Image: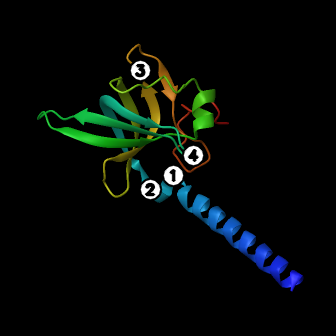
């Protein structure tokens, strides 16, 4: 009986571990699965929220269009660790910060983009992208070889 309980516990532990791995794998994706390298986009707007989550950080921003309407956008960045190494901190983008993001629009045309570069109000440029994910190599990534 004790062997049966141990086997059931081992099977349950393995099932939970596999479920967590599958969830994490599904959340991480290659650039080309969601974003279009042929649809570069420049967004100028105001930060409403910054999410420091793995596997990709997200910047939420309001973009005011020429007609005065406001569009809500989500901009994907690299992993939080990578962003910190490139100069971002949790205090870099408080709500209300005006930013300019150069990146690539989502394949489905939604208000989501993969951020490549971010410019802060003082002119500071920060690289947001993640190399090796299929994003276009254009020499702006300081870690590209």
Please report whichever mark, 2 or 3, sits nearer to the chain's N-terminal start. 2
Query: x%, y% of residue 35?
Result: 43, 52
Please report whichever mark, 4 or 2, sits nearer to the chain's N-terminal start. 2
98 or 95: nearer the viewer: 95
Mark 4 falls on what kind of element?
Answer: loop
What residue occupies the far left of the structure in this picture? 67
Query: x%, y% of residue 120?
Result: 41, 20
Please report whichever mark, 3 or 4, sits nearer to the chain's N-terminal start. 4
Q: CA distance from mark 3 to mark 4?
A: 23 Å
Q: CA distance from mark 2 to mark 1?
A: 6 Å
In front: label 3 or label 1: 3
Q: Which residue is mark 2?
A: 34
Please report whichever mark, 1 or 4, sits nearer to the chain's N-terminal start. 1
Q: Which residue is mark 3?
A: 120
Q: Residue at position x 59%, y 27% from top?
A: 86
In the image, residue 58 sits, relative to residue 3, either above or below, namely above
Residue 29 showing in the rendered view? no
Give the side of residue 143 with respect to residue 123, left or right.
right
- Residue 145 found in image quarter: top right
Local crowd at mark 3 within 10 Å, few (<14), some, or many (≥20)? Answer: some
Q: CA distance from mark 3 to mark 1?
A: 24 Å
Residue 54 is labelled as 4
In front: label 3 or label 4: 4
Give the side of residue 74 with respect to residue 131, left or right.
left
Q: CA distance from mark 2 to mark 3?
A: 26 Å
Q: Residue at position x 30%, y 30% from top?
A: 44
Q: Which residue is mark 1?
A: 31
């Amino acid at each position: 009986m004790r062997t049966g309980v141990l086997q059931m516990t081992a099977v349950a532990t393995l099932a939970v571990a596999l479920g967590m791995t599958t969830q994490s794998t599904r959340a991480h994706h290659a650039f080309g699965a969601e974003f279009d390298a042929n649809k570069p986009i420049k967004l100028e707007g105001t930060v409403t929220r910054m999410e420091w989550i793995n596997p990709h950080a997200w910047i939420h921003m309001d973009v005011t269009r020429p007609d005065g309407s406001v569009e809500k956008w989500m901009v994907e960045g690299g992993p939080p660790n990578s962003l910190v190494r490139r100069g971002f901190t949790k205090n870099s983008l408080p709500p209300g910060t005006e930013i300019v993001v150069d990146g690539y629009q989502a394949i489905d045309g939604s208000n989501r983009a993969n951020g490549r570069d971010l410019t802060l109000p003082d002119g500071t440029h920060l690289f947001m992208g993640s190399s090796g994910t299929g994003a276009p190599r254009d020499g702006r990534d300081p870690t590209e070889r």
